[in-house]
Image: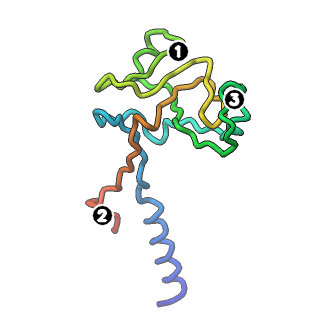
Amino acid sequence: MTDLQMEVEVDTNSSLQESLPKPQVMYRCKKCRRIVAIEENIVPHEPGKGEECFAWKKRSGNSEQVQCSSIFVEPMKWMQTIHDGMVEEKLLCFGCNGRLGYFNWAGMQCSCGAWVNPAFQLNKSRIDECKSEPNPNLNMET
């Protein structure tokens, strides 16, 4: 095999790997298993400085870095209370009507201390993070 053939073969293999779909992260209601958000709906935020960001009454004296207990998403169609004109309210699952989180158009503070404006917060304790696997039945070879 010549060097040119080896380069073409390596390029072909790398392009096949790049074209394979990556597993997508989905978030499901723990109660009824309906999909409530996907990875593209997540609104990232910079972690805050922990308890330094909270009022002194909310501090516990523990100086450890706190992980986020929620994810923040963009507003979605299933969030009925948003469409009803509410400024802040609970977010209920559209399948089982279970409480998933809270929203506030003025924003809210994450458990890590960062402020997110506007805030559509889903509690991690109420949702499951699932990864969808690429379809193994797809034959990517030509």
In this view, the residue in front, 56 or 122, is 56
Foreground: disc 2 or disc 1: 1
Look at 49% across and 10% down and name the residue there. 86
Q: Which mark is residue 54?
A: 3
Q: How was this image coloured? A: rainbow
Q: What percent of the width, then of the height, locates residue 115?
A: 66, 29
Asked where in the image residue 140 lies, by quadrant, the reply is: bottom left
Disc number for residue 124: none
* Residue depth check, mark 3 versus mark 2: number of the one nearer the observer: 3
Name the kind of residue labelled 1 in the image: Glu
Q: Residue 54: x and y, percent?
A: 69, 29
Figure check: 139 above or below 117: below
Q: Specify which label sits upstream in the sequence, 2 or 1.
A: 1
Residue farthest along the front direction in this orientation: 61
Question: What separation in Å lies between label 1 and label 3 (alpha carbons)?
Answer: 20 Å
**Could you say which disc has been placed on residue 88 in the image?**
1
Dot 1, crowdedness within 10 Å: few (<14), some or many (≥20)? some
Whole-angstrom CA distance, mark 2 to mark 1, is 48 Å
Task: Check residue 139 in the rendering and tell me which mark sits there, or answer none.
Answer: 2
Q: Residue at x 48, y 65 (%)?
A: 15
